[in-house]
Image (cartoon, helix red, strand yellow):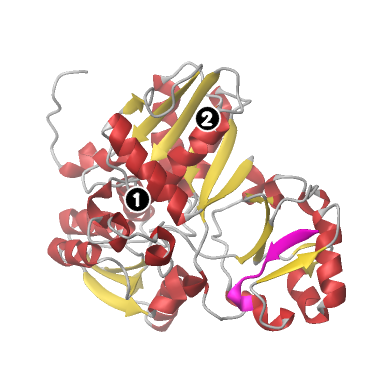
Amino acid sequence: MTAVRIPPTLRAEVGGERQVEAHGATVREVLEDLARRYPALEQHLFEDGEVAPFVNVYVGGEDVRTLDGLDTQVNGLPMILLPAMAGGR
Amino acid sequence: MGASTLAPSLLDLVGHTPLVELSRFAPGPVRLYAKLEGQNPTGSIKDRVAKAMIETAEASGELEPGRRLLEPTSGNTGISLALVAKLKGYRLTCVLPENATPERRQLLELYGAEIVESPAEEGSNGAVRLALAMAEADAGWFMPFQYGNAANPRAHYEGTGAEIAEALDRVDVLVAGLGTGGTLMGTGERLRETFPDVLVAAAEPLPGDPVMGLRSLADGYVPPILDVAKLDRKVLVSNEESVAALRELLATEGIFGGVSAGAVVHVARRLARELEDGVVVCVLADAGWKYLSADFWRARDVETSMERTVWW
Protein backbone atom coordinates (compact mmCIF):
# COMPACT_ATOMS: atom_id res chain seq x y z
CA MET A 1 0.00 0.00 0.00
CA THR A 2 1.38 3.36 -1.06
CA ALA A 3 0.19 6.77 0.10
CA VAL A 4 -0.22 9.13 -2.86
CA ARG A 5 -0.53 12.86 -2.26
CA ILE A 6 -2.94 14.53 -4.66
CA PRO A 7 -2.51 18.22 -5.66
CA PRO A 8 -5.47 20.62 -5.38
CA THR A 9 -5.80 20.56 -9.19
CA LEU A 10 -6.69 16.83 -9.16
CA ARG A 11 -8.68 16.49 -5.96
CA ALA A 12 -12.05 16.79 -7.64
CA GLU A 13 -11.16 13.63 -9.59
CA VAL A 14 -10.58 11.65 -6.36
CA GLY A 15 -13.62 12.86 -4.43
CA GLY A 16 -11.83 15.77 -2.75
CA GLU A 17 -9.20 13.69 -0.96
CA ARG A 18 -5.78 15.19 -0.21
CA GLN A 19 -4.21 11.77 -0.07
CA VAL A 20 -5.28 8.36 -1.35
CA GLU A 21 -3.90 4.85 -0.97
CA ALA A 22 -3.03 2.69 -3.94
CA HIS A 23 -1.49 -0.69 -4.76
CA GLY A 24 1.43 -1.50 -6.99
CA ALA A 25 5.12 -2.35 -7.05
CA THR A 26 6.01 0.23 -9.68
CA VAL A 27 4.89 3.79 -10.40
CA ARG A 28 3.02 2.48 -13.46
CA GLU A 29 1.09 -0.04 -11.37
CA VAL A 30 0.24 2.51 -8.69
CA LEU A 31 -0.98 5.07 -11.23
CA GLU A 32 -2.95 2.41 -13.12
CA ASP A 33 -4.57 1.31 -9.86
CA LEU A 34 -5.56 4.95 -9.24
CA ALA A 35 -6.86 5.35 -12.80
CA ARG A 36 -9.00 2.21 -12.39
CA ARG A 37 -10.59 3.46 -9.20
CA TYR A 38 -10.82 7.11 -10.27
CA PRO A 39 -11.35 6.97 -14.06
CA ALA A 40 -11.44 10.77 -14.35
CA LEU A 41 -7.77 10.80 -13.33
CA GLU A 42 -6.48 8.74 -16.23
CA GLN A 43 -6.45 11.44 -18.91
CA HIS A 44 -4.47 13.71 -16.55
CA LEU A 45 -1.83 11.16 -15.61
CA PHE A 46 -0.80 9.57 -18.89
CA GLU A 47 0.09 10.80 -22.34
CA ASP A 48 1.51 8.54 -25.05
CA GLY A 49 2.26 5.84 -22.50
CA GLU A 50 4.37 8.18 -20.35
CA VAL A 51 3.70 10.49 -17.41
CA ALA A 52 1.82 13.49 -18.88
CA PRO A 53 4.12 16.50 -19.43
CA PHE A 54 2.43 18.82 -16.93
CA VAL A 55 2.37 16.24 -14.13
CA ASN A 56 5.38 15.52 -11.95
CA VAL A 57 5.43 12.22 -10.06
CA TYR A 58 7.72 11.77 -7.07
CA VAL A 59 8.70 8.65 -5.15
CA GLY A 60 10.37 9.32 -1.83
CA GLY A 61 10.70 12.97 -2.87
CA GLU A 62 12.51 12.26 -6.15
CA ASP A 63 11.07 12.93 -9.61
CA VAL A 64 10.56 9.60 -11.36
CA ARG A 65 11.71 11.19 -14.63
CA THR A 66 15.25 11.12 -13.21
CA LEU A 67 14.74 7.62 -11.81
CA ASP A 68 13.24 4.85 -13.98
CA GLY A 69 10.12 6.71 -15.08
CA LEU A 70 6.96 4.61 -14.88
CA ASP A 71 9.10 1.55 -14.10
CA THR A 72 10.47 3.11 -10.90
CA GLN A 73 10.05 0.76 -7.94
CA VAL A 74 7.89 2.25 -5.21
CA ASN A 75 9.04 0.07 -2.27
CA GLY A 76 6.29 1.44 -0.06
CA LEU A 77 7.70 4.97 -0.19
CA PRO A 78 5.16 7.80 -0.24
CA MET A 79 4.33 9.25 -3.65
CA ILE A 80 3.51 12.85 -4.52
CA LEU A 81 1.78 14.14 -7.65
CA LEU A 82 2.37 17.81 -8.50
CA PRO A 83 1.45 20.11 -11.36
CA ALA A 84 4.41 21.46 -13.38
CA MET A 85 4.92 25.01 -12.16
CA ALA A 86 7.16 27.87 -13.20
CA GLY A 87 9.91 28.52 -10.70
CA GLY A 88 12.70 31.03 -10.91
CA ARG A 89 12.66 34.38 -9.28
CA MET B 1 43.03 36.40 -3.38
CA GLY B 2 44.24 38.70 -6.11
CA ALA B 3 44.66 42.46 -6.09
CA SER B 4 41.55 44.55 -5.78
CA THR B 5 39.62 44.99 -9.01
CA LEU B 6 39.32 48.29 -10.83
CA ALA B 7 36.14 48.09 -12.90
CA PRO B 8 34.78 50.56 -15.45
CA SER B 9 31.19 49.66 -14.48
CA LEU B 10 29.26 47.48 -12.05
CA LEU B 11 28.36 45.23 -15.00
CA ASP B 12 32.03 44.26 -15.22
CA LEU B 13 31.78 42.86 -11.70
CA VAL B 14 29.11 40.27 -12.52
CA GLY B 15 30.25 36.69 -11.88
CA HIS B 16 33.64 35.42 -10.67
CA THR B 17 32.04 34.63 -7.33
CA PRO B 18 33.99 32.76 -4.66
CA LEU B 19 33.72 29.11 -3.67
CA VAL B 20 33.89 28.38 0.05
CA GLU B 21 34.27 25.00 1.73
CA LEU B 22 31.48 23.93 4.10
CA SER B 23 33.54 21.73 6.39
CA ARG B 24 31.55 22.57 9.53
CA PHE B 25 28.12 22.19 7.94
CA ALA B 26 29.12 18.92 6.27
CA PRO B 27 32.17 17.33 7.91
CA GLY B 28 33.40 14.06 6.49
CA PRO B 29 35.46 12.60 3.71
CA VAL B 30 33.40 14.30 0.99
CA ARG B 31 34.28 17.95 0.54
CA LEU B 32 31.37 20.32 0.02
CA TYR B 33 31.88 23.71 -1.66
CA ALA B 34 29.36 26.52 -1.99
CA LYS B 35 29.50 29.09 -4.79
CA LEU B 36 28.32 32.35 -3.28
CA GLU B 37 26.19 33.97 -5.97
CA GLY B 38 24.86 36.44 -3.42
CA GLN B 39 28.12 38.30 -3.98
CA ASN B 40 27.07 39.49 -7.42
CA PRO B 41 26.39 43.26 -7.72
CA THR B 42 22.64 43.13 -6.95
CA GLY B 43 23.01 40.14 -4.65
CA SER B 44 21.93 37.21 -6.79
CA ILE B 45 22.92 34.82 -9.54
CA LYS B 46 20.42 36.52 -11.85
CA ASP B 47 22.92 39.31 -12.56
CA ARG B 48 24.66 36.82 -14.85
CA VAL B 49 21.41 36.01 -16.65
CA ALA B 50 20.18 39.60 -16.99
CA LYS B 51 23.49 40.86 -18.35
CA ALA B 52 23.77 37.97 -20.81
CA MET B 53 20.18 38.26 -22.09
CA ILE B 54 20.44 42.01 -22.73
CA GLU B 55 23.92 41.95 -24.26
CA THR B 56 23.03 38.99 -26.51
CA ALA B 57 19.91 40.82 -27.75
CA GLU B 58 21.90 44.00 -28.33
CA ALA B 59 24.57 42.14 -30.25
CA SER B 60 22.02 40.42 -32.51
CA GLY B 61 20.26 43.73 -33.22
CA GLU B 62 17.01 42.44 -31.74
CA LEU B 63 17.13 45.04 -28.97
CA GLU B 64 17.47 48.62 -30.20
CA PRO B 65 18.18 51.66 -28.01
CA GLY B 66 15.07 53.11 -26.40
CA ARG B 67 13.01 49.88 -26.35
CA ARG B 68 10.96 49.15 -23.22
CA LEU B 69 11.80 45.91 -21.43
CA LEU B 70 9.19 43.58 -19.90
CA GLU B 71 9.86 40.50 -17.74
CA PRO B 72 7.85 38.17 -15.49
CA THR B 73 9.81 37.76 -12.26
CA SER B 74 9.10 37.44 -8.57
CA GLY B 75 12.21 39.38 -7.72
CA ASN B 76 15.83 38.59 -8.39
CA THR B 77 15.75 38.63 -12.20
CA GLY B 78 13.82 41.88 -12.11
CA ILE B 79 16.33 43.51 -9.80
CA SER B 80 19.21 42.34 -12.00
CA LEU B 81 17.47 43.51 -15.17
CA ALA B 82 16.75 46.85 -13.45
CA LEU B 83 20.45 47.38 -12.88
CA VAL B 84 21.37 46.41 -16.44
CA ALA B 85 18.52 48.53 -17.86
CA LYS B 86 19.55 51.55 -15.81
CA LEU B 87 23.19 51.40 -16.87
CA LYS B 88 22.30 50.81 -20.52
CA GLY B 89 19.44 53.30 -20.71
CA TYR B 90 16.31 51.15 -21.08
CA ARG B 91 13.01 51.40 -19.21
CA LEU B 92 11.91 48.21 -17.46
CA THR B 93 8.53 46.87 -16.35
CA CYS B 94 8.36 43.72 -14.20
CA VAL B 95 5.31 41.48 -13.83
CA LEU B 96 5.34 39.96 -10.37
CA PRO B 97 2.87 38.08 -8.18
CA GLU B 98 1.19 40.51 -5.79
CA ASN B 99 2.45 38.54 -2.77
CA ALA B 100 6.16 39.01 -3.54
CA THR B 101 8.01 40.20 -0.42
CA PRO B 102 8.06 43.99 0.18
CA GLU B 103 11.86 44.14 -0.07
CA ARG B 104 11.68 42.94 -3.66
CA ARG B 105 9.07 45.44 -4.67
CA GLN B 106 10.97 48.22 -2.89
CA LEU B 107 14.27 47.28 -4.51
CA LEU B 108 12.69 47.19 -7.96
CA GLU B 109 11.20 50.62 -7.40
CA LEU B 110 14.46 52.04 -6.07
CA TYR B 111 16.30 50.76 -9.13
CA GLY B 112 13.67 52.52 -11.24
CA ALA B 113 11.59 49.62 -12.54
CA GLU B 114 7.83 49.80 -12.95
CA ILE B 115 5.67 47.02 -11.51
CA VAL B 116 2.62 45.23 -12.87
CA GLU B 117 0.99 42.79 -10.45
CA SER B 118 -0.32 39.32 -11.27
CA PRO B 119 -2.70 37.41 -8.96
CA ALA B 120 -1.02 35.89 -5.89
CA GLU B 121 -2.88 32.60 -6.18
CA GLU B 122 -1.54 32.03 -9.70
CA GLY B 123 2.08 32.22 -8.53
CA SER B 124 4.88 32.43 -11.07
CA ASN B 125 2.73 30.74 -13.74
CA GLY B 126 0.36 33.71 -13.51
CA ALA B 127 3.18 36.23 -13.91
CA VAL B 128 4.48 34.34 -16.96
CA ARG B 129 1.01 34.21 -18.52
CA LEU B 130 0.32 37.91 -17.98
CA ALA B 131 3.71 39.00 -19.32
CA LEU B 132 3.33 36.81 -22.42
CA ALA B 133 -0.13 38.31 -23.05
CA MET B 134 1.19 41.88 -22.66
CA ALA B 135 4.06 41.23 -25.07
CA GLU B 136 1.66 39.66 -27.55
CA ALA B 137 -0.64 42.69 -27.43
CA ASP B 138 2.06 45.35 -27.84
CA ALA B 139 5.09 44.86 -30.08
CA GLY B 140 6.78 47.82 -28.37
CA TRP B 141 7.86 45.58 -25.51
CA PHE B 142 11.08 43.65 -25.67
CA MET B 143 10.82 40.65 -23.37
CA PRO B 144 14.12 38.90 -22.54
CA PHE B 145 12.04 36.03 -21.03
CA GLN B 146 14.42 34.09 -18.82
CA TYR B 147 12.33 30.90 -19.11
CA GLY B 148 12.90 30.59 -22.85
CA ASN B 149 16.08 32.55 -23.55
CA ALA B 150 19.13 30.48 -24.54
CA ALA B 151 21.35 33.27 -23.19
CA ASN B 152 20.21 32.21 -19.70
CA PRO B 153 21.82 28.74 -19.68
CA ARG B 154 24.71 30.06 -21.79
CA ALA B 155 25.56 32.61 -19.07
CA HIS B 156 25.99 29.65 -16.72
CA TYR B 157 27.90 27.58 -19.26
CA GLU B 158 30.39 30.38 -19.89
CA GLY B 159 30.34 31.81 -16.36
CA THR B 160 29.20 29.71 -13.41
CA GLY B 161 30.28 26.37 -14.91
CA ALA B 162 33.58 27.56 -16.35
CA GLU B 163 34.50 29.21 -13.05
CA ILE B 164 33.85 26.00 -11.10
CA ALA B 165 35.77 23.88 -13.62
CA GLU B 166 38.71 26.26 -13.33
CA ALA B 167 38.69 26.37 -9.52
CA LEU B 168 38.44 22.64 -8.77
CA ASP B 169 40.27 19.63 -10.12
CA ARG B 170 37.45 17.28 -9.23
CA VAL B 171 33.66 17.61 -9.13
CA ASP B 172 31.47 14.57 -8.47
CA VAL B 173 28.14 16.27 -7.81
CA LEU B 174 26.64 19.63 -8.77
CA VAL B 175 23.57 20.83 -6.86
CA ALA B 176 21.56 23.91 -7.76
CA GLY B 177 18.03 25.14 -7.26
CA LEU B 178 15.51 24.44 -10.02
CA GLY B 179 13.65 27.52 -11.20
CA THR B 180 13.96 28.34 -14.88
CA GLY B 181 16.50 25.53 -15.21
CA GLY B 182 19.17 27.94 -16.50
CA THR B 183 21.74 27.32 -13.77
CA LEU B 184 21.40 23.54 -13.92
CA MET B 185 21.40 23.26 -17.72
CA GLY B 186 24.33 25.63 -18.37
CA THR B 187 26.53 24.80 -15.40
CA GLY B 188 25.81 21.10 -15.79
CA GLU B 189 26.74 21.07 -19.46
CA ARG B 190 30.02 22.89 -18.84
CA LEU B 191 30.99 20.66 -15.90
CA ARG B 192 30.24 17.49 -17.89
CA GLU B 193 32.86 18.57 -20.44
CA THR B 194 35.59 18.62 -17.79
CA PHE B 195 34.17 16.00 -15.40
CA PRO B 196 32.23 13.54 -17.61
CA ASP B 197 30.86 11.54 -14.65
CA VAL B 198 29.53 14.52 -12.69
CA LEU B 199 26.05 13.98 -11.30
CA VAL B 200 23.76 16.99 -11.86
CA ALA B 201 21.13 17.34 -9.16
CA ALA B 202 18.22 19.76 -8.85
CA ALA B 203 16.73 20.94 -5.56
CA GLU B 204 13.09 21.68 -6.23
CA PRO B 205 10.60 23.48 -3.98
CA LEU B 206 7.70 21.41 -2.64
CA PRO B 207 4.86 23.90 -3.17
CA GLY B 208 2.18 24.42 -0.56
CA ASP B 209 -1.44 23.81 -1.57
CA PRO B 210 -2.35 27.52 -1.76
CA VAL B 211 0.19 28.34 -4.47
CA MET B 212 -0.86 25.43 -6.62
CA GLY B 213 -4.33 26.91 -6.82
CA LEU B 214 -7.27 25.05 -8.27
CA ARG B 215 -6.55 25.69 -11.90
CA SER B 216 -6.35 22.83 -14.34
CA LEU B 217 -3.15 20.92 -15.05
CA ALA B 218 -3.27 22.24 -18.60
CA ASP B 219 -2.16 25.58 -17.12
CA GLY B 220 1.05 23.90 -16.03
CA TYR B 221 4.35 25.21 -17.24
CA VAL B 222 7.67 23.66 -18.13
CA PRO B 223 10.28 26.30 -19.04
CA PRO B 224 11.40 25.80 -22.66
CA ILE B 225 15.08 25.96 -21.65
CA LEU B 226 14.66 23.11 -19.13
CA ASP B 227 15.41 19.58 -20.36
CA VAL B 228 14.68 17.28 -17.42
CA ALA B 229 16.45 14.43 -19.25
CA LYS B 230 19.72 16.28 -18.56
CA LEU B 231 19.19 16.08 -14.80
CA ASP B 232 20.49 13.04 -12.93
CA ARG B 233 18.50 13.75 -9.77
CA LYS B 234 15.53 16.01 -9.04
CA VAL B 235 14.74 16.21 -5.35
CA LEU B 236 11.81 17.90 -3.65
CA VAL B 237 12.64 19.97 -0.59
CA SER B 238 9.99 21.24 1.81
CA ASN B 239 10.05 24.81 3.08
CA GLU B 240 10.68 23.45 6.54
CA GLU B 241 13.76 21.50 5.42
CA SER B 242 15.05 24.55 3.54
CA VAL B 243 14.72 26.84 6.51
CA ALA B 244 16.25 24.31 8.92
CA ALA B 245 19.27 23.97 6.62
CA LEU B 246 19.43 27.75 6.21
CA ARG B 247 19.62 28.26 9.97
CA GLU B 248 22.22 25.53 10.30
CA LEU B 249 24.34 27.03 7.53
CA LEU B 250 24.28 30.38 9.32
CA ALA B 251 25.08 28.78 12.68
CA THR B 252 27.94 26.61 11.44
CA GLU B 253 29.50 28.57 8.58
CA GLY B 254 28.25 32.12 9.07
CA ILE B 255 26.66 32.04 5.62
CA PHE B 256 23.34 33.89 5.44
CA GLY B 257 21.61 32.34 2.46
CA GLY B 258 18.27 32.75 0.75
CA VAL B 259 15.58 30.08 0.97
CA SER B 260 16.76 28.17 -2.10
CA ALA B 261 20.31 28.15 -0.69
CA GLY B 262 18.93 26.24 2.29
CA ALA B 263 17.30 23.70 -0.01
CA VAL B 264 20.46 23.34 -2.08
CA VAL B 265 22.78 22.66 0.86
CA HIS B 266 20.18 20.27 2.29
CA VAL B 267 20.27 18.20 -0.92
CA ALA B 268 24.05 18.60 -1.30
CA ARG B 269 24.71 17.14 2.13
CA ARG B 270 22.29 14.30 1.51
CA LEU B 271 24.03 13.39 -1.76
CA ALA B 272 27.46 13.82 -0.14
CA ARG B 273 26.48 11.11 2.34
CA GLU B 274 25.87 8.73 -0.55
CA LEU B 275 29.53 9.05 -1.58
CA GLU B 276 32.64 7.60 0.02
CA ASP B 277 34.82 10.47 -1.06
CA GLY B 278 34.78 13.24 -3.62
CA VAL B 279 33.68 16.82 -4.17
CA VAL B 280 30.17 18.24 -4.12
CA VAL B 281 29.61 21.76 -5.40
CA CYS B 282 26.46 23.67 -4.65
CA VAL B 283 25.35 26.96 -6.11
CA LEU B 284 23.78 29.35 -3.57
CA ALA B 285 21.66 31.68 -5.69
CA ASP B 286 21.30 34.54 -3.24
CA ALA B 287 21.71 35.69 0.36
CA GLY B 288 19.02 36.01 3.02
CA TRP B 289 18.59 39.80 3.09
CA LYS B 290 15.59 39.90 0.77
CA TYR B 291 13.73 37.41 2.98
CA LEU B 292 14.06 39.26 6.29
CA SER B 293 10.46 40.48 6.25
CA ALA B 294 9.14 36.93 5.80
CA ASP B 295 7.29 35.40 8.76
CA PHE B 296 9.14 32.12 8.77
CA TRP B 297 12.14 33.34 10.79
CA ARG B 298 9.94 33.65 13.87
CA ALA B 299 7.05 31.35 13.02
CA ARG B 300 6.45 28.29 15.12
CA ASP B 301 4.88 26.49 12.19
CA VAL B 302 7.34 27.19 9.37
CA GLU B 303 5.42 25.21 6.77
CA THR B 304 2.13 27.08 7.27
CA SER B 305 3.86 30.46 7.32
CA MET B 306 5.46 29.72 3.94
CA GLU B 307 2.82 27.78 2.05
CA ARG B 308 1.37 30.77 0.20
CA THR B 309 4.53 31.51 -1.71
CA VAL B 310 6.86 29.66 -4.03
CA TRP B 311 10.21 30.69 -2.56
CA TRP B 312 12.43 30.08 -5.58
Report which quarter residue B88 is drawn in.
bottom left
In the rendering, which numbered label is found on residue B59? 1
Chain containing the residue with disc 2 = B
Foreground label between 2 and 1:
2
Task: Check disc 2 and report the residue beneath it.
Answer: B191
* Side of A15 relative to B71 (left or right): right
Residue B217 in percent (x, y) is at: 63, 75
Q: Residue at x 47, y 71 (%)?
A: B211
Report which quarter residue B110 is drawn in.
bottom left
Range of residues picked out in magenta? A1-9
**Residue that lies at the very extreme toward the front in this rendered image:** B300
**B167 is higher (above) or lower (below) than B251:** above
Q: Which amino acid lies under the numbered mark 2 shown in the image of this protein? A: Leu
Q: Camera-side residue: B157 or A76?
A: A76
Report which quarter residue A83 is drawn in.
bottom right
Q: Which amino acid lies under the numbered mark 1 shown in the image of this protein? A: Ala
